[in-house]
Image (tube, rainbow, N blue to C red):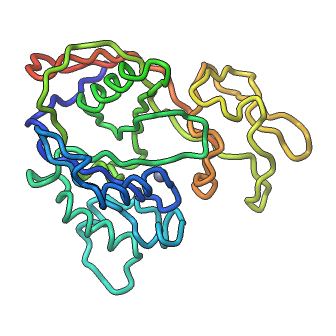
Amino acid sequence: MTSLPAPREPLRRVAVIGGTHGNEMCGVHLARHWLKAPGELQRASFSAMPVLANPAATAACRRYMDRDLNRTFTLTFLRSEATPDDPYEVTRARELNQLLGPKGTDQAFDFILDLHNTTANTGVCIISESPYTVFNLHLCHYLQMQNPDLPCRFLEYETSQNETYSLESVSKNGIGKAFPAFEMEGYRKLGAVDFPRTSDGGLAGTVHPRLQDHDFEPLRPGDPIFKLFSGEDVLYEGDSIVYPVFVNEAAYYEKHVAFLKSEKIQISVPALPGLTSSPTVAS
Ligand SMILES: [Zn+2]
């Protein structure tokens, strides 16, 4: 069982971000659209600001120019002294931290919705770095209730590092409206699996056809996960069922990730506001 942080202040300032990765076009298109028509985002109880996060990569239709922007919002990068040789995304992360943060301060935006695309077959998915928040869980649940025919999954994406690094980690979070308590299903990242590789680091095979496009479906010990170019199958050797996510995501080749392994979790989320106890998670 894990205790989660309770929400704090009502949500007042929201940023909706596109183009954190310059070749993920849904967010790019929406950010450009809302920058021309910002009134569409406004609501009575909070302000909402559109931002195009990585203009240079967006212009080039690339994920990034020098390094992955969405791995650059660590305090190490944000607080380091600027130099003329800094990678473009490090400079841009500092600018966004000034605009939306500073990270970890009371001045930070209450909530950042950062829009991404994936080449994997994940469907609609809300990803939250640990420690995730009650607000994110309510948001996911609300979307699930609004679109029962379009699953919206929740993935707890715990970083392997000691600190969060994504753009959304710059914000605080909170909410100004009451929502009842509920139970929901989610997924917790367990680790990553790389492709089979040759001795010089090249690919020795690809994702098995029986795994391709089966994000969030159970993978059992003994199920095939890769098809070697020599024709043999590589089987999953774990000792329990896992749920693959981001299967064959193109941008993750360079990160040595063929897919993520996750476990299914049940989450008991208390009502908002008026929390009297912390929510709990049962694996
Ligand atoms: Zn992305």
Q: Residue at x 32, y 74 (%)?
A: 91
In the rendered image, the vertical position of residue 223 relative to residue 58, given as above or below:
above
Query: Is residue 20 found left or right of 208 in the rendered image?
Result: left
Instruction: Name the side, left or right, on which 242 lies relative to 149.
Output: right
Please, is residue 95 above or below residue 230 in the view? below
| Residue 254 point in image, percent of width and height | 61, 58
Q: Quadrant of the N terminus?
A: top left
Q: Position of residue 47 (x, y in %)?
A: 15, 47
Left or right: 39 in relation to 253: left
Left/right of residue 117 with respect to residue 133 in the rendered view: right
User: Is residue 176 shown above or below 277?
Assistant: below
Q: Residue at x 31, y 84 (%)?
A: 83
Residue 179 at x, y percent in the picture = 19, 19
* Front residue (pair 34, 15): 34
Q: Quadrant of the C terminus?
A: top left
Query: Is 272 above or below relative to 46?
Result: above
Location of residue 8 (image quadrant) = top left
Q: Is residue 163 visible?
A: no
Residue 49 visible from this viewpoint: yes
Q: Toward which corner of the image does residue 74 lie, by quadrant? A: bottom left
Q: Residue furthest bottom?
A: 84
Q: Nearer the viewer, residue 177 or 109?
A: 177
